[in-house]
């Protein structure tokens, strides 16, 4: 392909100076600039784009990972909405999580009380129901925990610490 363009005189002078410095002919310099530009553009597209896109991806993945309603694959709020509307539940789309107004960080200390909507109440009921199912039917389900609830909740006494140190 052959392209001819009119270059203003001031840019032409700068281009000729650049050619002298790089010891290239003007057509070679223009070709090298075009190659550099298009290769850089293509590489940036392959590597994930600009810095903004990379940061947006990181933030979206972090929100998926630490959201109270997310298990890493599905969002409990979206699944409940899908079940109510009788649609097939879909996997999480990180960009939806990035702009989700219901995001609650499970790493943060308990937030101040907020008004719970129907989905929050249903989510809490589902958690309680799952806990009851495990407590009532754990033997039939084949669930054998390494520690029981009583062992986890019991306080460690001075004698427990001493016996651990003696058996070390």
Image (tube, grey):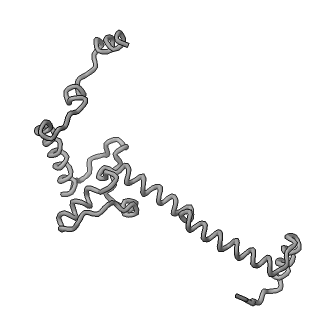
Q: Would residue 54 be found to the left or right of residue 112 on screen? A: right
Q: Residue at x 79, y 86 (%)?
A: 8
- Please report the residue visible at 18 percent of the width from the left and 57 percent of the height from the top: 118
Q: Is residue 82 above or below residue 7?
A: above
Lateral position of residue 44 relative to residue 136, left or right: right
> Compared to 28, does 82 lie above or below?
above
Quadrant in which the C terminus is drawn: top left
Report the residue at 75% width, 90% height from top: 4
The correct choice, above or below, for 6 with respect to 91 in the image is: below
Q: Would you identify the image quadrant in which residue 154 lies?
A: top left
Instruction: Please count the marks in the image.
Output: 0
Of the 4 image quadrants, the one containing the N terminus is bottom right
Q: Quadrant of residue 38?
A: bottom right
Q: Residue furthest top?
A: 166
How far across and down, in percent of the image, does residue 145 sit? Answer: 23, 33
- Compared across the picture, whether 163 is left or right of 62 comes to left
Name the spot of residue 115 as percent of width and height, x first.
Answer: 23, 53
| Residue 104 pos. (x, y %) | 33, 51
Whole-percent x and y of residue 33? 73, 74
118, 141: nearer the viewer:
141
Could you say which is closer to the camera, residue 4 or residue 104?
A: 4
Q: Quadrant of residue 50?
A: bottom right
């Amino acid at each position: 392909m052959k392209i001819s363009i009119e270059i203003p005189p001031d840019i032409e002078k700068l281009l000729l100076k650049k050619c002298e410095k790089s010891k290239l002919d003007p057509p070679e310099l223009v070709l090298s600039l075009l190659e550099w530009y298009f290769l850089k553009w293509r590489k940036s597209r392959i590597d994930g784009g600009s810095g903004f896109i990379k940061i947006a991806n990181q933030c979206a993945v972090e929100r998926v990972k630490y959201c109270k309603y997310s298990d890493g694959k599905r969002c409990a709020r979206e699944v409940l909405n899908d079940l109510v509307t009788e649609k097939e539940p879909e996997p999480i789309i990180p960009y939806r999580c990035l702009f989700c107004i219901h995001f609650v960080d499970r790493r943060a200390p308990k937030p101040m009380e907020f008004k719970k909507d129907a989905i929050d109440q249903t989510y809490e009921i589902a958690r309680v129901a799952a806990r009851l199912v495990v407590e009532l039917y754990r033997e039939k389900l084949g669930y054998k925990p390494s520690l029981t609830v009583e062992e986890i909740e019991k306080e460690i006494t001075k004698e427990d610490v001493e016996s651990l140190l003696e058996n070390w």
